[in-house]
Image: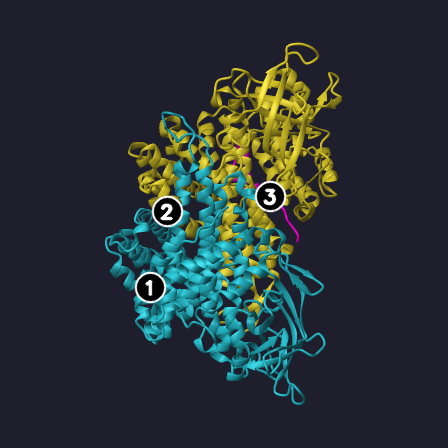
Chain colours: A cyan, B yellow
Amino acid sequence: MTYTPATQDQLLAIRVNAGIEELAASEKFAAAEPDMVEAIVEGVGQFAAGEFAPLNRVGDLEGAKLENGVVRLPDGFAEAYAHYVEQGWNAIASPEEFGGQGLPFTLACNVLENLGTANMAFNLLPMLSVGAIEALEHHGSEELQQKYLPDLVSGKWSGTMNLTEPQAGSDVGALRTTAKPIEDGEHAGKYLIKGQKIYITWGEHELAENIIHLVLARLPDAPEGSRGISLFTVPKYHVKPDGSLGPRNDVRCVSLEHKLGINASPTCVMSYGDNDECIGELVGAENRGLAAMFTMMNNARINVGNQGVQIGERATQQAMDYAKERVQSARAGSPDKNPVSIIEHPDVRRMLLRMKALTEGSRALLYYTAGQVDRGVLGDENAKARGEVLTPLIKAWGTDIGIEVASLGVQVHGGMGFVEETGAAQHWRDSRIAPIYEGTNGIQAADLVTRKLGLHDGEAIGSLIADIERECGGEAHLLTLARDCADVVAWMRNEASLDDRLAGSVAFCTMLAVATAGWQLLRQLRAVESGDAPALVKSKPASVRFFLDRIVPEASGLKASAMAGGEALYAIPTEALLG
Amino acid sequence: MTYTPATQDQLLAIRVNAGIEELAASEKFAAAEPDMVEAIVEGVGQFAAGEFAPLNRVGDLEGAKLENGVVRLPDGFAEAYAHYVEQGWNAIASPEEFGGQGLPFTLACNVLENLGTANMAFNLLPMLSVGAIEALEHHGSEELQQKYLPDLVSGKWSGTMNLTEPQAGSDVGALRTTAKPIEDGEHAGKYLIKGQKIYITWGEHELAENIIHLVLARLPDAPEGSRGISLFTVPKYHVKPDGSLGPRNDVRCVSLEHKLGINASPTCVMSYGDNDECIGELVGAENRGLAAMFTMMNNARINVGNQGVQIGERATQQAMDYAKERVQSARAGSPDKNPVSIIEHPDVRRMLLRMKALTEGSRALLYYTAGQVDRGVLGDENAKARGEVLTPLIKAWGTDIGIEVASLGVQVHGGMGFVEETGAAQHWRDSRIAPIYEGTNGIQAADLVTRKLGLHDGEAIGSLIADIERECGGEAHLLTLARDCADVVAWMRNEASLDDRLAGSVAFCTMLAVATAGWQLLRQLRAVESGDAPALVKSKPASVRFFLDRIVPEASGLKASAMAGGEALYAIPTEALLG
């Protein structure tokens, strides 16, 4: 199957929803001028389609394998990653002083979108490195930054995030990995790390020359819970003062998970300090590790939402191709009874348009969010707050629609969709992780109805809904949904208990995400109608209308759920629920 | 993991929704008295949990394998199937003259529900045999019936359905397999069958002593399309006049599909007549094969809808168990900060209650449908028509909720849900086939808005909606949804074009299914409130309220989609849709 980068729709979203021209008007992002933006979007699209996409199927079939402590990837992965580093794609949004290009997050999103559409599992390698870079950029000492950032920014080295332990998943505060200060000797001032971490994405591999693990652990006598957690760097290979690699550190991959999807991404159980010789260095202040981790986690959540857009795009393209090629039955009611491509049948066309509308809607929301984050970096506090409101929306709804679109892709293929050779099933399997990791979608929704609901005394969320209401023009369904969202907010802020809000959180999160995506699609439509994207002049109106006329009213159907309250959930005793 | 048959909820649905006592008042079903019903429901539940359930995981891991033309199943399958036959479960609803028990279809549904909840892939073996039995029962000559039915009814032999060919999927009329009359010799009066069939469930295996394939093929000079198709029996082993097995027929399994799920169910590519010696016998009249196939396809569709209930029940039980065992985080806002089982967290509880409500709602709809089918058999024409309206609802919505519930099950498990060892992922993978086979859910919805919409001049569907409106009591959301359904029906019958109806078909199918399930759950609730099922007195109100207060209003959100019309789907030229 072929894969064509969605370059034109990405450029439209970057212009209209992220507002790249406004960003480029700032000194910081002055390099993001139109020619540069086009060069990046087109260039990374071609690279991803040419080098990452052909490895998607083999990555699923063969997967990552652990052999004598070494993780092996299928042939081609090492070469493709080397080319990725050579071409400088890893460095897009990183600081210029460490070799990065200092471009907006918006464009880093685009790099990830293209790589992940081509190969979701492979893209997790750069995606996790970005997290390590951000953590060090914001919290590392200058010494740590000088030591690690240049090679992390170039991609020569990769990074990982180590939070989860068997007993500490959503509740990170329950982690038990320890860090003991080293008082004397070669490593004085550093720490001995000891513990086991699970679900470590790309925790071990040979594609990069070194791996810098960012590890959450507890210092001796640290406070209990999340206030007693510190962040450490633990390199796979020690780094000598001259920057060359020293001996191996005491960290190893114990096993790989056998997963439902993203098989080419090694999900590692990592063991630190089996021989009590695992050396780490503190990042930021003692006991402030979780805050440091959350700095980068906001963007990481947007990057996971991005994965929904990615799998949606890939699944949609594959389903379109199949629906065009597969001939079956005449159109219902056709006089000639000639069989047609199934793309001509109303319900298949409905499925394809739904896939397209959901994918484009989530893309519009993604770049709108990214643009707000970039404005926040430029010092716009309102945009920063809006970016914080939007983050759980794109993470949760983006990943939910990723599954829905991939499932529709299977359905369009009929029986062939259930046969693994076709590839449609892989997208669906791959898509399933995204609502789980980087904070489950339930946790995103909880964040929305607690912290984000009260942000700026309610103004952050209130102004978003007011903007949608004001700019929805004559779109009755969108106006209704915006008002429904406002009703839910008013109830949640004024009348609802904490349980009530949590009980309605996921429904409300979907409502607000759909309203925002619909609004941003409407802005795209207006831009296309005024000549902004001639290549999309025929397709954009169809997908936007589908979104506004069908998907938006469905979201209003969630209002009752959002406001149903928490009591009903506890009216049934736990034992009766179990049995 | 353990699995407990949902005996009490099944009995409630069989009493309240199927109305078993009314059925037992007839001469034909007089044997279905309360003691017998309980014995069957409890007995098959225990059998399924004891013998089929333990093979579910190994069936997924090892799957069916083709070795030198022979299909091998993991250890234990042959023994479990032998016990199934010995205990007589295969014969529940088959005619007594061929060794069956002649009980209502309702109870056959219950046998399948229990077996399939225990092991969805394994259950396809009995499920397909039922189809072969029904086809022969209604269309086979007495000679064919005497030859095949006793051993099919007992389960000593199994049956298959052979419709699909690579170019003939949803469009069965495009099939090319041929049948040539044999004029002379030993097989005079029979037919030489030649062709290849795909997606043949349990097409080859050694669990039964013989396999009777029901094969659609074309006679020489048959009319084109679906009017030129005839139905044939093709035994794996020829059957001698004395009933003993003769030599092997010229039919073989060429390969097995590598599928997303139901790995223990061999999905075969079957080749008939490689050596021009494949002997078949005509079932029913020449060129009337499709009609004969459709006789049994109605019940087969209900049986596939049943699979949604099955996977929902299994996934719900597994998620409940996990949510009870897994301790993580304190309740939000709790003063003591003590970690609790995740079943105590509002959003996890919401997911579990949603799983439970959807599963019980689909079960209520399943048995309501089965009861109407049984009344149709007894000669009640209105019930027969209602059963025909309900069939696409349970097939499409039942299988859709199967996926949704299994997906929620994965989500409740968090990261563990994405790891295959847990088993939650298997349910989700298994569930994905059901919306595809036995007529895709799009085809079910098309059937609903074409044939079923006009059945009895609209009275069949109109009376269903009227019943819901009349009996919904004070349930405002349910009344609204019933009226929404009535609006859609009025528009579809009076104003909409064929394309308009097809464009809204899936949305409307969901709306009507949810309305009917909500109504049937309400009937269950009233029965429980009047003391009908003491074991469910605490749990039933919670799941019914969840369904009526949250799931029903969501379905009203589909009204705009149902009535959005077909024009928008074709406003975009196919080339622009492709990209």
> For the residues tagged 2 and 1, is the chain the same?
no
> For the residues tagged 3 and 2, is the chain the same?
yes
Q: Is residue A209 left or right of residue A488?
A: right
Q: Is residue A413 left or right of residue A256?
A: left
Kind of residue at disc 3: Lys
| SS at mark 2 in the image | helix
Residue hosting label 3: B259
Q: Is residue A527 left or right of residue A293?
A: left
Asked if residue B306 shows in the view, the reply is yes
**Which one is closest to the eye, mark 3 or mark 2?**
3
- Horizontal and vertical percent for residue B395? 50, 38
Q: Chain of mark 1?
A: A
Pointer 3 with pointer 1, Cβ within 8 A: no
Q: CA distance from mark 3 to mark 1?
A: 46 Å
Residue hosting label 2: B556
Q: Which residues are magenta?
A: B1-22
